[in-house]
Image (cartoon, grey):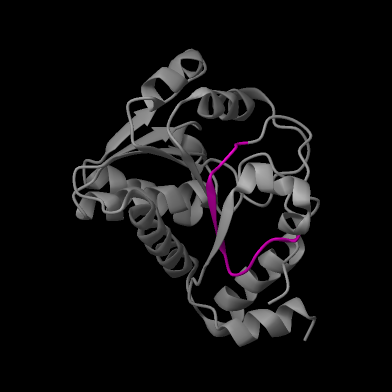
């Protein structure tokens, strides 16, 4: 299957929701559950393992909330580090944040004053999940996102990126500023166009594709403009 651009990815998501009728929250649930499978495979099991999940306010962060819930159900210690204020959460991400909160999952808000010490907190875990920013990011990261990425890269545990390493451009595969350096990237629907650029491999690590419930033949047809 051909790699997808940013606009193609959005168009396929929109088609699945509006034309097929798959609710966005279902797509997010599928994505988070399959990412959890990959994280558990990486750890060779989940029971007793500890996972730090760094989340933003968008759908990428929503995937992170789902991952934390499923890891907890598999007897892992999952801790959410929320980089963006909760009041910025909307849509499916806000739904899954409320679920995580109602389940009393460990959610830690990381404000600007806390960010400089984030790497020391992350060092306590077996693996870090990057669910801060997704394919919509363009240009150089700034503010809390930039500092969070630098802190993740300064931490010792391996990093698994969800959909795309935060800060990497989906279409060009290039970095204009700080970018998460992952050992594995679990991307949705298909590889992203930027992953075809050899230089992107130092950020993505191994790339795995997660099937989130959209038929592969439909993804291929829409990607081809059909």
In this view, the residue in front, 8 or 90, is 8
In this rendered view, identify the residue nearer to me: 94 or 194.
194
The image shows residue 217 at horizontal and vertical percentages of: 62, 87
Residue 96, x across and y down, in percent: 37, 52
User: Up-down: is 56 above or below 74?
Assistant: above
Residue at image location 37% in from the left, 46% down from the top: 97
Q: What quarter of the picture does the N terminus occupy?
A: bottom right
On screen, residue 107 versus residue 171, left or right, reads: left
Residue 61 location in percent, x, y?
A: 48, 46
In this orientation, which residue lies closer to the viewer: 179 or 135?
Answer: 179
Res. 34 in view: yes
Badge count: 0
Image position of 218 (left or right of 36):
right
Q: Where is residue 56 drawn, in percent x and y?
A: 52, 39
Residue occupying the point 74% across, 76% down: 223
Can residue 173 be seen here? The reply is: no
Question: In this rendering, would 68 be left or right of 58?
Answer: left
Residue 184 belongs to the span the image colors magenta: yes
Q: Quadrant of the C terminus?
A: bottom right
In which quarter of the view is residue 208 placed? bottom right
Q: Which residues are magenta?
A: 180-193
Q: Is residue 104 above or below residue 110?
A: below
For the point 52% across and 17% down, the residue is 112
Specify the quadrant of the image occupied by residue 34.
bottom left
Residue 128 is inside the magenta segment? no
Using residue 1 as the reference point, say whether residue 37 is left or right of it.
Answer: left
Identify which residue, 169 or 93, lies in the foreground. Answer: 169
Where 192 sits versus 212, above or below? above
């Amino acid at each position: 299957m051909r790699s997808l651009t940013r606009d193609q990815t959005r168009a396929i998501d929109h088609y699945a929701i509006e034309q097929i009728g798959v609710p966005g929250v279902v797509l997010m649930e599928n994505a988070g559950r399959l990412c959890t499978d990959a994280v558990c495979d990486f750890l060779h099991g989940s029971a007793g393992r500890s996972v730090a999940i760094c989340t933003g306010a968008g759908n990428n962060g929503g995937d992170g909330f789902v991952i934390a819930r499923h890891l907890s159900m598999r007897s892992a210690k999952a801790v959410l580090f929320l980089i963006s204020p909760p009041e910025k959460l909307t849509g499916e991400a806000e739904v899954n944040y409320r679920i995580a909160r109602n389940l009393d999952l460990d959610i830690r808000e990381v404000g600007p004053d806390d960010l400089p010490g984030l790497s020391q907190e992350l060092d306590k875990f077996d693996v870090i999940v990057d669910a801060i920013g997704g394919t919509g990011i363009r240009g150089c990261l700034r503010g809390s996102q930039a500092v969070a990425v630098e802190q993740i890269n300064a931490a010792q545990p391996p990093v698994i990126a969800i959909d795309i390493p935060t800060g990497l451009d989906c279409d060009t595969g290039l970095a204009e500023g700080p970018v998460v350096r992952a050992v594995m990237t679990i991307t949705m629907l298909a590889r992203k166009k930027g992953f075809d650029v050899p230089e992107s491999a130092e950020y993505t690590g191994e790339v795995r594709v997660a099937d989130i419930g959209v038929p592969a033949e439909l993804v291929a047809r829409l990607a081809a403009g059909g």
